[in-house]
Amino acid sequence: MAPMQAKVKSVLSGDTLVLQNKNDPTQERTFSLAFVSAPRIRKEGEEPFAFQSRDFLRRLCVGKVVQFNVLYQIPVGVKRDYGTVTLADGQQLPDLVVAEGWAKIRDDAGKKEDTEEGTTLLERLEALEAHAKADEKGVWGKDPKIEVVHELSDAKAFAETWKGKSIDAIVEKVLSGDRIIARLMVTPTQHTQTIVLVAGIRAPGTKRTLSDGSEQPAEPFGNEAQAFVDQRLLQRGVSVTILGVSPNNLLVGEVRHPNGSIAEFVLKAGLARCTDHHSTLLGSEMGKLRQAEKYAKDNKLALFRGHVSARHGGADEVEATVSRIFSADTLFLRNKAGGERRINLSSVRQPKPSDEKQAPFGAEAKEFLRKRLIGKHVKVTIDGKRPATEGYEEREMATITYGNKNVALLLVENGYASVIRHRMDDTDRSPIYDELLAAEESAQKEGKGMWNPKPPKKIDPTDYSENVTTAKRQLTLLSRQRKVPGVVDYVKSGSRFTVLLPRDGAKLTLVLSGIRAPRSARGPSDTAEPFGQEAHDFANRRCLQRDVEIDIEDTDKVGGFIGAMYVNRESFAKSLVEEGLASVHAYSAERGGNANELFAAETKAKEARRGMWHDWDPEKEAEKNGEAFENGVADAANGTNGEPVTNTKKEYKDVMVTHVDATGRLKLQTVGTGTAALTELMNRFKSFHLSSANNQPLPTPPKTGDVVSAKFTEDDTWYRAKIRRNDRDSKTSEVLYIDYGNSETIPWSRLRPLDGAKFGTQKLRPRANDAVLSYLQFPNTPEYLQEAAIMIGEVTGDRQLIARVDHTDQKDGTMFVTLFLDA
């Protein structure tokens, strides 16, 4: 009979192979090597040398195309062919197996050699066997006694012992696209044969017989997935990295063949889906599986042949400002046009109010987010929409990043949010879902946030404005303090707020002094005064949930506290007046000591016809006040930078503009003896910091107002700087470089103590002076204002100028100047 070709699917023992038709893998035949017998592998107990014998033949043949020639058949029982096999390199079986000692000549071999070819083969085998026996090869040698465990009694204990370790294995059977029976070679003499689930994927099931004898058909593409893995892994050597156990107590592992993880190949072919249950086990490797699944979805392969990619109109990244923190997973964002929308963070959930262990952390989680995000510019990508359900409106799910940090991940890492377990068909999951799961597991292990078994102590703030008596009692203490830190918890109107005082564990009602804001509507049936709602909305935008500082002056008749409030160190009363959303209350302003500032802001609003002054007529006002009105000016001329320009003698100075801020305000250095002194100081300053003895960090965290040495980010040079504000959580400070006027936020590691005796402000006062350009009003539109500031910087940068000082503010020393180019 002429030789035939086939592909070796598997090896049953050292003398028997399963062959597949090259063109039709479903056609199989069992083929045994003529005249020889090898030890058998049995579940009830393997014969000596059975594994080594089979493994020798397995390594030679599995997955390869061979030629085979049938010499005889045994018709009794299962029909089986016996003959010879020729490998691709010309070596022949059973000759090679006998020569290496892994098979013996059968006792009845002499009865079957009824052909000349058979006789010749048998004589050759007898000679080869004699040599193998003499050399004690294979089965003629000493049995190493391999112990094989077929029933894994304690999968969890096994997984704990081998977790994260790679074990060489042989795939004995492929049950489906996501589970195999593997022979784990724990040591050369100890093997464990058990089911292993392929980590990270869920493949459709194959046909199976139920306990009642009925058959359950295969799921769509179940047989294809099984055949795909079978073709690549059956009886192949693989490495299995044990990751854990399933709820059914089966081992879960990453299975890799020489070309990589089998899970990636199955997913890329569209024959399985990713499963979130194994995400924390796989860690960063899960991302590769997601990409493989995405490839199958994009190309509509197999399971995903009808897949339609989810498209969302707002999928592009946009920028917005965080206007309000509703909870640890829900924020309100305001776009550039002023529109506000509610956004939910994708794939995370705040501490559950219904869970008695998590609920106490709700306020703490919200505060964690508020400190970091309120008023900040963030980047937003809409991941999907959660349809409306009973009790819930439709919700937009989004990924929000701030400073290149994913906000949801930040919450989960600190234990202030849990990760939602999505359904497989959910399309609104976070793009870093696997990172979130890993972060949650880490936070749980470390007992962070709501995973801490000890809940925080609930503190109900004391209400200082509960009644007049309580307010009067606290007034004495509060009026002695300056710039008391607080948080605006609620905006009652444009000039009335509920302010939390975290340091005191208290809250109070604050009424802004020196102004009167129009009243907003207090309910659906109430009517607001003109511009009352606008003032209320403006206060909400600027103040709600912001960190503020307050100065208390007095109390009102109902227990409210009267005083000033500063947002980002700027008086909010002044901001309201400048926007035309409040008028100055003269008596109160004079009493509070900020009358000049407020009247200047009101004048500015009137001249710009803002808000309530939209129809302001200066001639009518002058007539009403009994003042002369000539050439468009009532009494004395007023500058538009907030201060009256007096007709005193003008002063001229040689100056350098060292900084122009975003609002067009200037920082000037006066050229003269101070310039040389600064140069000399900076030279000594540089030499001072070159010494390792002076390279010591701050002994204690910096405080606002401290003057320190700060290393400027752009040129890595040390300069004198003043601390503006601190973030103790991130250990950073906003510093103002007092000799040049620019500022930045830097880590505490770039701060050093300042030697006051050598470099302090008593030695050389700060060289950067505040100034504004006289008679100018800058545009209100942010884009135009930015262009104006850039233009000023370009015209004045790196050149000496002449400044005419038109006026100096007696309150803060700001100079109103006209600048001339020095020809």
Image (spheres, rainbow, N blue to C red):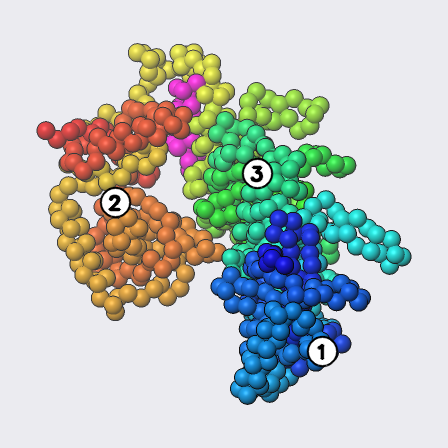
Quick one: label 3 or label 1, which is nearer the N terminus? 1
Above or below for 717 versus 554: below
Residue 57 appears in the figure: no
Compare residues 269 and 703 and report the one nearer the observer.
269
Report which residue position mark 1 lands on: 108
**Element at badge 2?**
loop
Residue extending farthest left:
823
Above or below for 573 versus 135: above
Residue extending farthest right:
212
Above or below for 670 versus 368: above
Q: CA distance from mark 3 to mark 2?
A: 55 Å
Q: Quadrant of residue 489?
A: top right
Compare residues 76 and 163 and report the one nearer the observer.
76
Residue 314 appears in the figure: yes
The quadrant the C terminus occupies is top left
Q: Name the amino acid type tagged 1.
A: Asp
- Magenta-colored stretch includes residue 599: yes
Quick one: label 3 or label 2, which is nearer the N terminus? 3
Disc 2 residue crowd, few under 14, some 14–19, many 20+, Cα 10 Å:
many
Report which residue position mark 3 lands on: 298
Q: CA distance from mark 1 to mark 2?
A: 104 Å
**Magenta stretch in the rendered image:** 589-609
The residue at 57%/73% (across/down) is 95
**Residue 469 horizontal side relative to residue 368, left or right:** right
The residue at 33%/58% (across/down) is 751
Report which residue position mark 2 lands on: 740
Q: Name the amino acid type tagged 3.
A: Asp
The residue at 49%/21% (across/down) is 611
Quick one: label 1 or label 2, which is nearer the N terminus? 1
Q: Name the amino acid type tagged 2.
A: Tyr
